[in-house]
Image (spheres, rainbow, N blue to C red):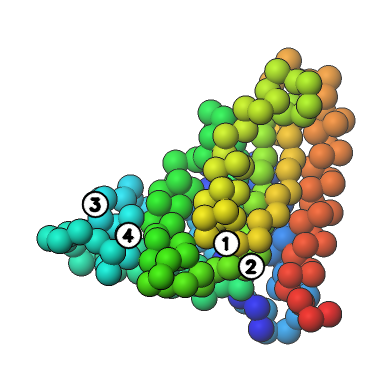
Amino acid sequence: MPTLLHLDSSAGGTASRSRRITAAFAEAFLASAPGNRVVHRDLHADPLPHLPDESLHWAPALRGAGADPGPDAERLQAGLISELLAADVLLAGVPLYNYSLPSALKAWLDHVHVPGLTAPSPVSGAPLAGRPAVLIATRGGDYGPGTVNEGRDHATPVLELILGTEMGMSVRVVTAGLTLAGTVPALAAQRAGAERELADALREARSLGASLGCPGA
C-alpha cells in the first residue's frame, strides 16, 4: 500500500494554514485505502542542520578525491534520501517566508537533491521519475495577476525546478493566499476571499489525498 512522506515547515503551529491543509491531505490519504502509511517529518520542530560539507551535494561515486564529509553527516543524508525514495507520494507544506522557502525546508532540499542518488545520472538512473509531489503553497498576501506581489513567490518555482525538472517528480501545487488577512489591517477587506481560498485549498487537498492514496481506484 502507498506510503506518504509528509513534510511541514511552518513556524505557525496550530494557527498555520499550510499545516491545516497538509493535515487534510494526509487524513484523506490514510482513509482512502487500508494499510496506507504516513511518515511525518516536522522540519520546524525538528530542524535539520545546514549541509556541513560541499561534497554531500554529490553521490559518493561522483565526489572529488579526498572528500570526507564525516560519518554522521553521511548517515543523516542517507537516512533522509532513503525516506524519500521509500515514499510513493511526497507532500510538502510551503509557507512563503520573505518571498522564499522556509530555511528548514531548504535544508531538507539540500540534503536530498543529490545527482547520482536522487537526480538522474548514469550512476543512479532516475529513481524518482514520475513520482507525485504535492506542494501546499501558502502566502500571506495576494499574489494574483495584476497585484503588486505578482511574480514574487520565489519558493514554488524553486521546488518545481528541483523536484520536477531536476529530480523528475510529477509536481502539483495547491495554493492558498491572503493567510494574513485576519491579522494585517491592510488586508482586512479581503478576509472573505482568504476564507474562500482556504476552503478551496482544503477541498483540493482532500481530493488529491484520496486519489493518490488509492491510485488503482
Mark 2: few/some/many CA within 10 Å (<14, 14-19, 20+):
few
Q: Quadrant of the C terminus?
A: bottom right
Q: Secondary structure at mark 4?
A: loop
Sequence-first disc among 4 and 3: 3
Vertically, is 177 above or below 88?
above
Give, as a three-letter code, the residue at label 4.
Trp
Residue at 86% x, 39% y: name it: 196
Q: Is residue 212 left or right of residue 95?
A: right
Residue 2 in the image, given as x and y percentages of width and height: 65, 78
Question: Looking at this view, is 185 or 172 the one in front?
Answer: 172
Alpha carbon separation for disc pair 2 and 1: 6 Å
In the displayed orientation, state which residue is furthest to the left: 66
Quickly name the residue at label 1: 168
Mark 1: few/some/many CA within 10 Å (<14, 14-19, 20+):
many
Q: Secondary structure at mark 3?
A: loop
Q: Secondary structure at mark 2?
A: loop
Quickly name the residue at label 3: 53
Residue at 44% x, 41% y: name it: 103
Residue 152 in the image, given as x and y percentages of width and height: 62, 27
Sequence-first disc among 1 and 3: 3
Sequence-first disc among 4 and 1: 4
- Numbered label attached to residue 130: 2
Give, as a three-letter code, the residue at label 3.
Asp
Question: Looking at this view, is 121 or 3 the one in front?
Answer: 121
Alpha carbon separation for disc pair 1 and 3: 25 Å
Nearest-to-viewer mark from 2 and 3: 2
Q: Is residue 12 visible?
A: no
